[in-house]
């Protein structure tokens, strides 16, 4: 490690934190500045002015926005997101189990999708311009054009309803064994994996091709090295960073894709929770979920950048 | 001839081309070439771009780059036809018997691995040497090639050494496995002229000391004449002429070869300066926004009507920056510019239409100097309309006049730039500049991207046009041969300063300052034994005494102590 | 002229078909949009070509009207995102300096939040009416158009022919319209196709989540939502609009792909 690299890393991490702070402002400001009023939304159009005023006071909607933001952020950092307007439940508590469920789902989707995508991406490069490559391109083009919920319902219709292999609704609870849980979420995992697979394959293919077309690969081939030596000795050290980058970006994408999939499979995760409370206009819940999703997304993007920095030999070994 | 190391018979090579909007089709790019190369000899392959020289070089390693495929013929190395060999034999050939030095060492070294690991890789993988012996041999080669710190340079990463040094490392990489044949593919083309001569000498000595045979590929006949025993001239994939160096240089038979040999023979007689200077710059100093270093330091020079001022220097000398300051793209910090008897505003926006019209510019890359979506007529027509309000039939008549002047003619009127060759594009840029009826044209390396014969044509055209139109040129170049060919006045620039300035005859006559001498003596000349003469001369000790390794490969200091590892 | 490849022809055909049906919806639809004409989830018959939906409306008519809504919203959002994104992108590229920096950092900021999450946060406080949906989608998507058009324009601005035009004394507007635009048009047109697909998928997703077009108005995402319960009973009504979304998206994609390939092959010439 050297000073230059440490400085760049520190800069990138600081940027990530700054970004997160600004996002928190945007999320908070967005929900109070936009037309529409929380109290009105909760009580409906027919609410009396007195009831509205009472509710506003109760939610401290009359305080200056800055003060509300600071107290909201300070509490949020300590893990306190307040209580849900609609149910009066503690948000942090409800989020706890749901976040765990979502991470569980996303984790297994990643476990399936990442190795598969890397393998298929490499396969596409190996058979570049031949039928496996063309097939892989066509499939990824198609799956980018297909809404996630279509894949979900097609699977439910054929695999769960017609074939009855897996349950159509992904209910899990703490009493289930790991195997039972995995069986329950088999279909959502499959859909999520399919959705990110396309992107990841395409990006992996591009990243590897980019490396394979470098002049130093030609040099290695002209040294009489065999394919394995070329790939492990020369392509791999340079391809690892772009590939990690691809994986991280797609995991970020997966975290968002989870929202729709949870609704399709009625899975008790964060996405379902968020969507439910958006339609109920439960602003504190939406803010909390929005902040967490954004944090994960920004965090994964940051890791991608950090890996790229760490892998750059020019930065690791300065002049 | 059965003991020839490399024997090529009726070699045919095809490539898949992708014409825009059409189906890819196969095209033959080498049409049945045959030659022999004996052990320990050097054969120079020379030709313009598209002549197929690199393709032939790589074919002797049974390798085709991109969509290139060897479609016919035989290539014998060490008595075996490598085109009929299996994978395993081909791998043993590559890096073991034949190795390759590319034009861009910077791209050919893996950025993620240390130099030493890459230099010895082939020797170890081919089981020619143990790792330890290979490293020993590499260090020895580093020393022989005149690299600084030969014992430790292998521990560095490619980006930690300079371009010229990396090119020598690449030579060490090729020589390390003790091959029988090395393919040098334009190994000095990307280097500055003073660096080129160092690398050239290092390569020459390494070839001599190791007794290896070599194919030396280049577009520069003067360079190849210094290192080869035989020369083969190629044109569009066919053999033009083959013979000993002496025969090709001193007694060429074919017209094409004669043209290549006489390439730098344009003789422009220096004209005396007359009248008031069209451009005079005084004490220009400037730096780029956000930087703390001046890139020009007090630059002054004059250009007289109808004459050519050549500004010559290596990369980083500030010559292109000077052009940006004169055109107003980069305002100077100090100094002033007089143009046609009036003071030019430092800022482009404050210049009058007349200022802009009378001062035109032509760029190095004609490709990107013209909008690809405009036709030739539009491109030349715009300045006519913009400056003179010329439209319709009158405009068209003038455009065709200009097309005739640049020797292209009316049939080019409706074409797009993409349909033209490099030389034709550059001619168009000249026509566009002339359309404004300028007093002066800045030519920024306008012949550098062109093949020598095409570049020669452009220079001749420029001189002819100068006689007709009386326009003055500020000619920026790194190539001293070009400078000799067309200038009246010369400014030699080095590290942002004018190192030497005066009439051509003065600048090119001794006594020289150290840098100008180094620069002048580094330009390859089209005669045998030139390299040895220069080296011998330098060893006696005018500039940067003992620049090169003694034949026994002793350690050598760096050039004048000024060139640091970039 | 060169022949249009078969995939692009198929794409063009279906894209125009969908647009035509959308425009002529009231003429071609056999029944009214919200008209209850039969039992719920009747199978396909001569009377109801695609069967009926969860409350007994003709699914075909609903699909046609739904397509009209989906395509209208997506087109309007694409139009908005394109106008805004490309104007700002060109402006930033040509002006450079602090204007470029400010705009680009702002766009980076918006793009660092996932689009769907951003939209959900906004829709939690604003009513989900059609203009709001168009505005939200158009604004969020304009960030991507901005990035592309700025990148394309920056590449072009770096070319010597732009510098040449500046040295000639041309005005900025002339440079944008005569030098930059002809070269930037093709990649932008191809991108427009991709943005349109994204808008279709996005509005469908929102409606599917119940946060987009509100009933009784129909749109394809909403029809999926209305009929999704049927899936469990083996009634595929929900798959039909989802299938329509996919075919429209693929068709537009095929066309966009072709436009893009034409562009690159033009660039791949010697120019």
Image: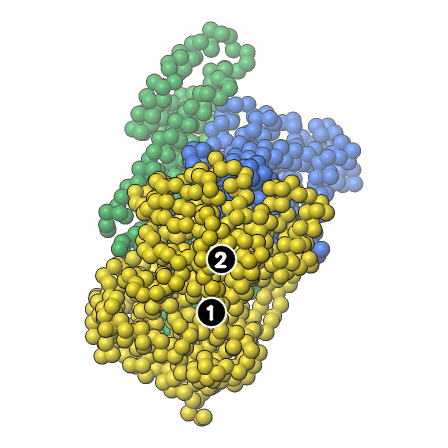
Task: Using the image, name the chain to which the residue with label 1 belongs.
Answer: B
In what element is the residue under mark 1? Answer: loop
Residue B13 tag number: none
Front-most of residues A19 and B17: B17
Residue position marked by numbered label 1 in the rendering: B264
Q: Is residue C48 visible?
A: yes
Q: Chain of mark 2?
A: B
Q: Mark 1, mark 2: which one is toward the viewer?
A: 1
Image colour for chain B is yellow
Q: Position of residue B215 (x, y in %)?
A: 42, 78
Residue B538 as seen in the image, left or right of residue C130: left
Name the residue carrying label 2.
Answer: B446
**Within 10 Å of the Cα at label 1, are there few (<14), some (14-19), or many (20+) other Cα atoms?**
some
Q: Residue C113: which quarter of the image?
A: top left
Query: In terms of depth relative to the viewer, which is nearer, A256 or B317?
Result: B317
In the displayed structure, B549 sits above or below A164; it is below
Q: Along the horizontal axis of the image, is A114 left or right of C217?
A: left
Rendered shade, chain A: green
Quadrant in which the N terminus of chain B is drawn = bottom left
Q: Which chain is in blue here?
A: C
């Amino acid at each position: 490690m050297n000073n230059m690299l440490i400085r760049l890393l520190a800069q990138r991490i600081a940027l990530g934190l700054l970004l997160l702070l600004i996002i928190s402002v945007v999320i908070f400001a967005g929900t109070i500045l936009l037309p529409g009023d929380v109290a009105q939304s909760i009580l409906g159009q027919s609410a009396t002015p007195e009831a509205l005023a009472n509710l506003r006071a109760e939610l401290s909607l009359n305080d200056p926005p800055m003060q509300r933001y600071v107290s909201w952020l300070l509490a949020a950092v300590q893990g306190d997101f307040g209580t849900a307007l609609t149910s009066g439940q503690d948000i942090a508590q409800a989020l706890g189990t749901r976040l765990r469920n979502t991470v569980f789902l996303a984790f297994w989707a990643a476990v399936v999708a990442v190795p598969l995508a890397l393998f298929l991406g490499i396969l596409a490069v190996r058979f570049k311009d031949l039928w496996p490559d063309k097939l892989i391109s066509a499939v990824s083009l198609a799956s980018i054009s297909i809404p996630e919920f279509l894949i979900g319902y097609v699977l439910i219709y054929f695999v769960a309803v017609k074939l009855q292999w897996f349950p159509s609704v992904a209910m899990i609870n703490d009493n289930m064994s790991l195997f039972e849980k995995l069986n329950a979420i088999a279909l959502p995992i499959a859909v999520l994996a399919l959705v990110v697979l396309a992107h990841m394959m395409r990006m992996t293919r591009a990243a590897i091709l980019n490396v394979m077309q470098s002049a130093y690969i030609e040099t290695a081939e002209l040294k009489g090295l065999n394919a394995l030596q070329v790939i492990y000795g020369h392509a791999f050290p340079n391809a690892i960073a772009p590939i990690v980058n691809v994986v991280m970006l797609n995991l970020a994408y997966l975290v968002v894709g989870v929202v729709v999939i949870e609704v399709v499979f009625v899975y008790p995760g964060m996405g379902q929770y968020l969507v439910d409370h958006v339609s109920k206009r439960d602003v504190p819940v939406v803010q909390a979920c929005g902040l967490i999703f954004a944090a994960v997304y920004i965090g994964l993007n940051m890791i991608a950048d950090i890996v790229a920095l760490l892998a750059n030999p020019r930065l690791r070994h300065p002049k | 001839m059965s003991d020839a190391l490399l024997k090529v018979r009726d070699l045919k090579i095809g490539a898949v081309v992708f014409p825009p909007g059409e189906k890819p089709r196969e095209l033959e790019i080498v049409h049945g070439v045959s030659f022999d190369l004996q052990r320990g000899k050097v054969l120079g392959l020379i030709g313009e771009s598209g002549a197929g020289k690199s393709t032939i070089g790589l074919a002797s390693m049974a390798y085709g780059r991109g969509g290139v495929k060897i479609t016919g013929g035989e290539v014998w190395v060490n008595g075996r036809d490598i085109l009929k060999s299996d994978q395993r034999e081909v791998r043993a050939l590559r890096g073991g018997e034949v190795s390759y030095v590319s034009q861009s060492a910077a791209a050919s070294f893996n950025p993620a691995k240390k130099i030493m690991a890459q230099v010895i890789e082939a020797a170890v993988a081919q089981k020619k040497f143990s790792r330890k012996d290979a490293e020993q041999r590499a260090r020895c080669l580093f020393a022989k090639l005149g690299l600084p710190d030969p014992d430790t340079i292998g521990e560095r990463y490619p980006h930690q050494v300079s371009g010229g040094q990396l090119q020598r490392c690449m030579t060490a990489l090729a020589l390390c496995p003790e091959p029988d044949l090395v393919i040098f593919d334009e190994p000095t083309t990307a280097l500055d002229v003073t660096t080129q001569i160092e690398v050239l000498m290092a390569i020459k000595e390494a070839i001599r000391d190791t007794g290896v045979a070599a194919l030396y590929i280049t577009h520069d006949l003067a360079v190849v004449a210094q290192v080869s025993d035989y020369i083969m001239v190629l044109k569009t994939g066919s053999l033009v002429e083959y013979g000993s160096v002496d025969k090709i240089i001193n007694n060429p038979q074919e017209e094409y070869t004669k043209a290549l040999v006489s390439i730098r023979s344009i003789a422009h007689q220096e004209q005396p300066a007359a009248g008031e200077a069209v451009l005079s710059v005084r004490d220009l100093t400037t730096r780029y926004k956000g930087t703390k270093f001046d890139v020009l330091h007090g630059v002054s020079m004059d250009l007289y009507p109808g004459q050519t001022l050549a500004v010559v220097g290596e990369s980083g000398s500030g010559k292109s920056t000077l052009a940006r300051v004169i055109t107003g793209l980069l305002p100077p910090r100090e100094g002033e510019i007089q143009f046609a008897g009036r003071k030019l505003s430092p800022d482009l926006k404050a210049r009058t239409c007349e200022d802009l019209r009378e001062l035109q510019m032509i760029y190095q890359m004609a490709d990107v100097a013209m909008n690809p979506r405009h036709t030739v007529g539009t491109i030349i027509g715009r300045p006519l309309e913009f400056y003179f309000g010329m439209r319709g039939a009158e405009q068209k008549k003038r455009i065709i006049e200009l097309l005739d002047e640049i020797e292209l003619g009316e049939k080019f009127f409706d074409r797009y730039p993409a349909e033209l060759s490099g030389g034709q594009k550059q001619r168009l840029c000249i026509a566009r500049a002339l359309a404004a009826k300028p007093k002066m044209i800045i030519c920024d390396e306008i012949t550098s991207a062109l093949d020598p014969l095409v570049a020669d044509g452009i220079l001749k055209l420029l001189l002819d046009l100068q006689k007709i139109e009386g326009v003055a040129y500020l000619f920026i170049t790194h190539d001293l041969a070009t400078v000799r060919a067309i200038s009246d006045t010369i400014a030699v620039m080095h590290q942002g300063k004018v190192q030497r300035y005066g009439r051509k005859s003065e600048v090119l006559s001794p006594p020289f300052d150290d840098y100008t001498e180094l620069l002048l003596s580094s330009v390859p000349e089209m005669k045998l034994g030139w390299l040895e003469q220069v080296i011998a001369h330098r060893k006696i000790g005018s500039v940067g005494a003992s620049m090169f390794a003694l034949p026994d490969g002793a350690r050598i200091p760096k050039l004048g102590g000024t060139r640091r590892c970039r | 002229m060169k022949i249009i490849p078969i995939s692009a022809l198929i794409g063009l055909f279906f894209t125009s078909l969908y647009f035509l049906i959308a425009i002529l919806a009231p003429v071609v639809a056999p029944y009214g949009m919200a008209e209850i004409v039969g039992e719920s989830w009747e199978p396909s018959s001569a009377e109801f070509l695609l069967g009926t939906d969860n409350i007994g409306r003709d699914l075909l008519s609903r699909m046609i009207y739904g397509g009209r809504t989906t395509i209208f919203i997506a087109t309007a959002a694409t139009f908005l995102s394109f106008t805004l994104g490309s104007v700002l992108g060109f402006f930033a590229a040509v002006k450079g300096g602090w204007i470029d920096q400010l705009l680009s950092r702002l766009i980076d900021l918006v793009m660092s939040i996932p689009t769907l999450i951003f939209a959900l946060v906004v829709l939690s406080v604003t009513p989900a009416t059609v203009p709001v949906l168009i505005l939200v989608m158009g604004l969020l998507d304009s960030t991507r158009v901005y990035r592309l058009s700025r990148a394309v324009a920056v590449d072009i601005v770096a070319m010597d022919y732009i510098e040449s035009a500046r040295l000639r004394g041309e005005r900025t507007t002339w440079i944008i319209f005569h030098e930059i635009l002809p070269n930037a048009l093709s990649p932008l047109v191809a991108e427009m196709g991709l943005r349109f697909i994204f808008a279709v998928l996005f509005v469908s997703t929102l409606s599917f989540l119940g946060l987009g077009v509100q009933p009784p108005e129909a749109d394809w995402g909403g029809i999926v939502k209305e009929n999704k319960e049927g899936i469990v009973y083996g009634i595929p009504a929900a798959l039909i609009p989802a299938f329509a979304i996919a075919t429209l998206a693929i068709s537009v994609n095929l066309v966009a792909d072709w436009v893009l390939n034409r562009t690159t092959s033009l660039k791949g010439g010697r120019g």
